[in-house]
Image (tube, rainbow, N blue to C red):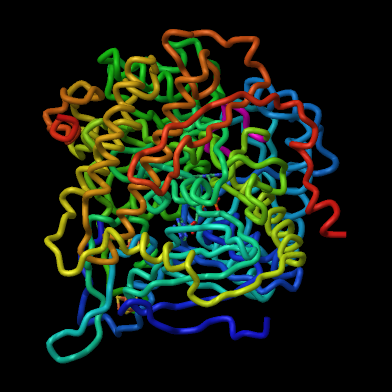
Amino acid sequence: MTRHWRQAGTWHGYSLDQAFCDVLIIGGGFAGLLAARAAARQSMRTLVVSKGFAGADGVSAFAGGVVLYLLPEDDREAFQIEHSRLSEGLSHPEAVRRVAEANMQLLGELTDAGAPVERTPEGRPRRRWLPAAGRRYVPRLGFPSTELARFLRQEALRAGARVLDQTIITRLQRTPNGGFWAVGFRRQEGMLVAIRAKAVVLAAGGCSWRGAHMGQHNVLGEGLALGLDAGARFLGMEFCTSYLATCSLFDTHGQDVLAALGGRLRNRVGEDILERHGIEHPAPPHLTAFAMLTELRAGRGPIHFDLRGVPPAAREDWETQFHLVARGLHRTGVDIFEHPVVWLPGFTGSIAGGGGVRTLDLAGTTEVPGLFAAGDAAARLALVGAGSGITFLNVAWALVSGHWAGLAAARHAAGEELSATGVDELLRGLLETTVRPLCEPAPAQTGTLDQLLRHTQMLAVDPERNFFRTPERLQEADAQLDACWERLHSTTVNDWHNLGRWYELRAMMLATRAMFHSALARQETRGWHRRLDYPERDPALEKVWLVAEPTSDPSGERLPDFTVWPVELDEPEAFRATACEEGAA
Amino acid sequence: MIERVDADRCIGCTLCVKVCPVDVLRMALDTSGRSKAVIAYPEECQSCFLCEIYCPTDALYVSPDRSPLHAVWPPSDTAAARGTSLPTALLREGTSGTTAPGHRLAG
Ligand SMILES: Cc1cc2nc3c(=O)[nH]c(=O)nc-3n(C[C@H](O)[C@H](O)[C@H](O)COP(=O)(O)OP(=O)(O)OC[C@H]3O[C@@H](n4cnc5c(N)ncnc54)[C@H](O)[C@@H]3O)c2cc1C
Ligand code: SF4
Ligand code: SF4
């Protein structure tokens, strides 16, 4: 194809921006930018689309800024042993080994290229050891997330990738002529977008249910829903019920780091809540969440984070690392280190939970030829298992899985032929469904969108329904979800901004449904998944993952049910990183 | 939440509009026909400060107050958070005094 990469046109009175590429990357967080860098370096015409500004977007730009960094001289055995205990039987040592190794290489390359990370006076990456999130043996590298994200955008551009910012993809489908159509719009310009690509990397993030943390406002599960639309399946959705404490004054994260520095969560009578529940420091994130929610439920809230024991030098250090958070906190005029304030259990959904689009190997290969998933959009059970939280593994996973998926997509694109293009039948259908909820001019139904957001949030975020799980509560919530979906599909929106919100809600509802159905299927308690009717781990479910597949078309008017079935995680092919190992050679 | 754009300082560079991850800000013409940033969808703001950081003229102000959290979370009451007493955390839907939209919907 010698066609120009971009072409302006119209469709039914709408402006239509058409683009053509070999590899399309959906999402401009760490995973998407690394995928773009990798694919573009393979001389593929690579295009990144991002809902916001790639590199200042997703949760990546606001991450706490710590990433795993093992080096060859480290005791990796010790790391593995601790890690396998924390992932409660559902990670795989081979996957962990490969990700840790590849992450080490990537971080090496990136820091050599000048990535903004914490450095020693000699300019070398400075690692720190901090017992946190249930672990004693974790070497971590600190970085300012906003700057690293910006740097990675530059890296992707330097490699030759192009970027379309402020562009929302709403529909993704493989075409009978090979390759994909991805359709969406640019909300600021009120313009439709259609992208023809030979291969796609889905890196549009996880589902946060629009949780209480910075960055979570624009990842509502589209990474998952787009995969489903294209024909992929989900994995491990029952573990997507995660929480991370946040300060009530201003979104402040870093729970694990603050606890490691001496912070203690206390209930209304001043007891250390972890101690009260017999949980040792450093506590695994899901046990901290358990203690917090149990205390609140028992009426022993509010929970204060007592940070008076954090030494002054460590406070300053923390403020440098969490600079956006510190900026907000200073503005509140309260010194949270001197005056313990209330902290809340902030829902983090699949961002910490580990479920997502099922991949068949570590290269992000999905069940749809040419579609690769990476970062939070991809299930990462092989790495984190059942019990991880937002730690230092998520960024490592985003970087490594993005890199591998970029290579794999490049390789796929190199062998993919596209015939007939133009506005074909399939594209027409996708454009039609994309604008269907849009009705200009119409009475604004933003009130309905708000209600639907709150309602769906309530079903997923309410710990009574979805943390302390019973089949009855899950089923009751699940039935309400049908009503939400129906109402969404009879709601019209009056502008492009709200069309974006409409699609976010759709994605969020699909993710909720898959989470509920997976939670009903796993009859045990393990990691983030807690069933009051099955309070113990079931040894028979050791090393068993659950796949969720919709039983009807997810773009239909009915909210699909999911059939959920087990897969054994010992199948060795699941831990190949083929594209990396062969493609990079 | 984003509180204001100082139109006198704004030079219309559009950076904040480009960078806001959640489409809070847009450009609009003022009465003298100059293009200025305006707050179009304040309720989406996640108080992330990116617009402030990118603005070359310091024309934006983001207040640190959170947008209200959903009823299943305890209210983020600043006075309470300063260490005075907070009513028992209200986790159960329905006990928070806020009508959960679900009841109307599910009928
Ligand atoms: C508060 C917080 C702190 C964290 N701290 C840490 C930490 O210290 N260490 C760690 O390892 N992990 C941390 N994490 C987790 C880590 O940040 C994420 O796992 C990781 O950044 C995910 O990267 P990603 O690229 O997959 O997704 P994201 O960064 O979420 O990127 C998703 C991208 O997709 C785009 N997108 C979404 N929908 C669409 C659509 N429809 N069309 C086009 N684009 C779309 C988004 O705009 C965004 O650009 C933290 C997470 C949070 C929320
Ligand atoms: S603070 Fe963040 S979300 Fe709010 S307007 Fe500025 S950039 Fe947008
Ligand atoms: S970044 Fe500042 S100067 Fe530029 S448009 Fe926004 S408010 Fe105006």
Q: Residue at x 60, y 74 (%)?
A: A420
Q: Is residue A88 a member of the stretch shown in magenta?
A: no
Q: Quadrant of residue A302?
A: top left
Q: Main secondary structure of the magenta part?
A: loop
Q: Nearer the viewer, residue A439 or A168?
A: A439
User: Can you name the residue that lies furthest to the front here?
Assistant: A425
Please provide percent x and percent y for residue A564: 53, 27
Q: Is residue A385 a member of the stretch shown in magenta?
A: yes
Q: Is residue A278 visible?
A: yes
Q: Quadrant of residue A15?
A: bottom left
Please provide percent x and percent y for residue B19: 40, 69
Q: Residue at x 25, y 85 (%)?
A: B35
Which residues fall within the magenta stretch?
A383-391
User: Can you name the residue that lies furthest to the right here?
Assistant: A585
Please provide percent x and percent y for residue A123: 72, 61
Image quadrant in which the N terminus of chain A is located: bottom right
Q: Nearer the viewer, residue B37 or B52?
A: B37
Q: Is residue A327 left or right of residue A546?
A: left
